[in-house]
Image (spheres, coloured by chain):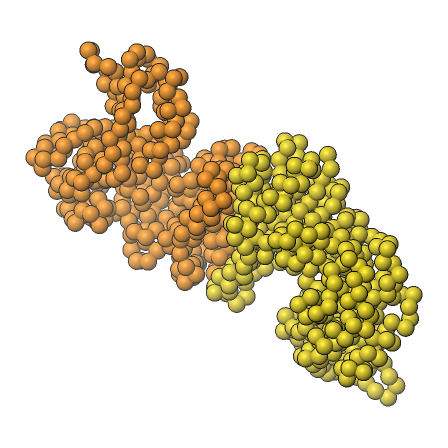
Chain colours: A yellow, B orange
Amino acid sequence: MERIVIKFGSATLASTEQIHEIAKKAIVEKDRGFDVVVVTAAMGSTAKEIVKMARQLSDDVSKRELDVLLSTGSQLSSALVAIALQEEGYDAVSLTGWQAGIQTEDMHVNARIDDIDVSRIEEHFAQGQIVIVAGEQGINYSRNITTLGKGGAETTAVAIAAALKAERVDIYTNVDGVYTADPNQVTRAQKLKEISYDEMLELSNLGSKILHPRAVELAKKFQIPVIIRSSEIDTVGTLLKEEVEMEKNLIVRGVAFESDVIRLTVGYDAYSDASLADIFTILAENRINVDIIVQAIIDGLKPTVSFTILKEEFAEALRVLEDSKVSLGFSFADFEIGLAKVSIIGSGMASNPGVAARMFDRLRREGIPVKMVSTSEIKVSVVVPQDEMIRAANALHDEFNLEQALYI
Amino acid sequence: MERIVIKFGSATLASTEQIHEIAKKAIVEKDRGFDVVVVTAAMGSTAKEIVKMARQLSDDVSKRELDVLLSTGSQLSSALVAIALQEEGYDAVSLTGWQAGIQTEDMHVNARIDDIDVSRIEEHFAQGQIVIVAGEQGINYSRNITTLGKGGAETTAVAIAAALKAERVDIYTNVDGVYTADPNQVTRAQKLKEISYDEMLELSNLGSKILHPRAVELAKKFQIPVIIRSSEIDTVGTLLKEEVEMEKNLIVRGVAFESDVIRLTVGYDAYSDASLADIFTILAENRINVDIIVQAIIDGLKPTVSFTILKEEFAEALRVLEDSKVSLGFSFADFEIGLAKVSIIGSGMASNPGVAARMFDRLRREGIPVKMVSTSEIKVSVVVPQDEMIRAANALHDEFNLEQALYI
């Protein structure tokens, strides 16, 4: 039988009324003849409340115990969805991460999935049951409960879909699809009917909160079609897949932006080839996500490396740098706060060398200073003052004619 | 190294402040050189809130899913206690039921422990860690989460103590020991220094809420000393053990009482030897706790069987009887509500045949009608109108001179 995986985010699970509603989404697919797995995030603000309680006990909560606490969130929501389905007359069973066979690495709070043993899910399918999996959690090699961090439930959904060779994943969220830019900030933003994994990956990495890049990466790796859709409005949503043929000729397909970016710069008296690798290795080991990296080795000037991180990881990044100052061998560090990143994304960009130039020119004409630049095959990102972020996004949306309803 | 198991009830875990306080109780024992297991119930009213949420979704919540929900309660409290211990500088680790090796029967919501595999607890001991076990839960043979129902955490504590061959179990609760009667209702009640398993078993079964009979039975079976003590007042508490030598000569050692008792009576046109077994078998299969049973087979009258149950199981008992009316072969059923049970308990009673007579005589003099009677080796229970319960308890406490401070 064909399988489908449906994921519900925290915002769609905030109340028992909402749980009743979303149960119906699973029922529609079951009635169509699919074997259905539902993956749930924690309800509403549960995670926040749990963390608050733990912080009342300690400023330095052990990550292992935090995972024990946090995992109760999706465990609760999974059982509540099962109960709602049973109330509608459907046979349903909830599974925790370890029951669903979600094997993760040993790391806590932000673990990655190593493997999924779907044999138990298959057993429940054989009995005609809808299976609800507590997303965001798994079990590590020491048989401890782990949680998966940001995007955990989405990643679980895609990973299970891959393991089950599912037809597709439906991600129900509080937006009705992927737009050319955030419609709350960019007035002429348009919903996209389809988007490629690579474009979505850039969008996800660039601060669009719709789908976590881990989930997109996994979907791309296993070529799982994913639909982003609203739990409230019954529209088609946006289909995420490998190739988006009909729009291949479009150069820019979206504008993304992200606030609360901080630039860190470290400078060296004596710089070696190892310096660059060393600093980013140590940041990666501490799970600090570094985004744009700019290295400047200019004769007559001290060598520097600049990179951006998010505000929430700033304190931790400073601590790591401070602790490793001697071994990393840098002589000074400074930072700039109040920055934002604005990016344009499009698969057609690689073959259009003039795109970046057009972007920079428009920003120059708008009088918006560009602090840092980063490019890839399918995107160009600039770091600008946070105050100018929205104006920059609107200007670029206009510059590349994204308001034209070519994509719907 | 000697081991000790410490159990904290819901009332002692209602806030993070309380969790900080109780962590210190575990630390005292650890500092004394014990390997310590802490067993936690769910915090305060967590269980009630969870059940409420489930009922919003369905009037007929599946017991399997209810267990998935309920088990999050003690999982949360166990991790919070671990965090509090870590904050005090002690190495601690929380374990869920399945991680702690609590193997239960398949039954949900009210499962019994079949076996405990303490190998993981032993591993943590070997690392010098304090182990916190989420009480009230286990895993069944289908690898589903089960909960243990009333007295679950106490039972878990005693079962783990037995498996670890622990020195003793400390039960921290909101009373400071076992009294000759409920001190809130019987003004002259005295705290007992020691009490035997059998006496405690009768007290527990007779509505004293201090310790669940399942836990007492297990403690008796494995001869584990148990101390009942207060988490707030630092007193010695009451020690529960096999023999209470110095008070052996006392006839009556306590008065217990329980309100909200209902008498059910079923009558037969044709009664067979199988009738009695059949009815109580079917009630037991449905986990309805029957207490006092009185059978009257009197020539010339229709045979009847009367028994008492608690108010909360009344609706379920009626449903079971109704469903099985034909197979059980009874012709009528009636019930009486507004009853209470008052009992006197004492190991010395068996060799004192006059005790029951003295009890009945005193109640007659007080003008309190006795509706049903039940006796065992070490207790006599009577069913009286609920309105008269407290007066009966005080009268019996007086009758057997329990106010004399012989026990302290």
Residue A8 against residue A254 in the figure, above or below: above
- Residue pushed farthest left? B365
Q: Nearer the viewer, residue B218 or A250?
A: A250
Q: Position of residue B404 (x, y in %)?
A: 14, 46
Image-based side of A154 in relation to B123, left or right: right
Image-based side of B366 in relation to A288, left or right: left
The residue depicted at 43 percent of the width and 50 percent of the height is B49
Residue A310 against residue B38 in the figure, above or below: below
Count the marks.
0
Q: Nearer the viewer, residue B332 or B197?
A: B332
Q: Nearer the viewer, residue A290 or B305?
A: B305
- Does residue A173 appear in the picture of this structure? yes
Q: Position of residue A121 (x, y in %)?
A: 66, 38
Q: Nearer the viewer, residue B312 or B34?
A: B312
- The quarter of the picture where residue A187 lies is bottom right
Image-based side of B375 in relation to B116, left or right: left
Residue B42 against residue B293 in the figure, above or below: below
The residue depicted at 18 percent of the width and 47 percent of the height is B186
Residue A341 against residue A176 in the figure, above or below: below
Quadrant that contains the N terminus of chain A:
top right
- The quarter of the picture where residue A65 lies is bottom right
Q: Position of residue B57 (x, y in %)?
A: 49, 44
Image-based side of B214 in relation to A332, left or right: left
Q: Position of residue B362 (x, y in %)?
A: 10, 35
- The quarter of the picture where residue A183 lies is bottom right
Quadrant that contains the C terminus of chain A:
bottom right
- Residue pushed farthest bottom? A300
- Does residue A121 appear in the picture of this structure? no
The residue depicted at 69 percent of the width and 60 percent of the height is A210
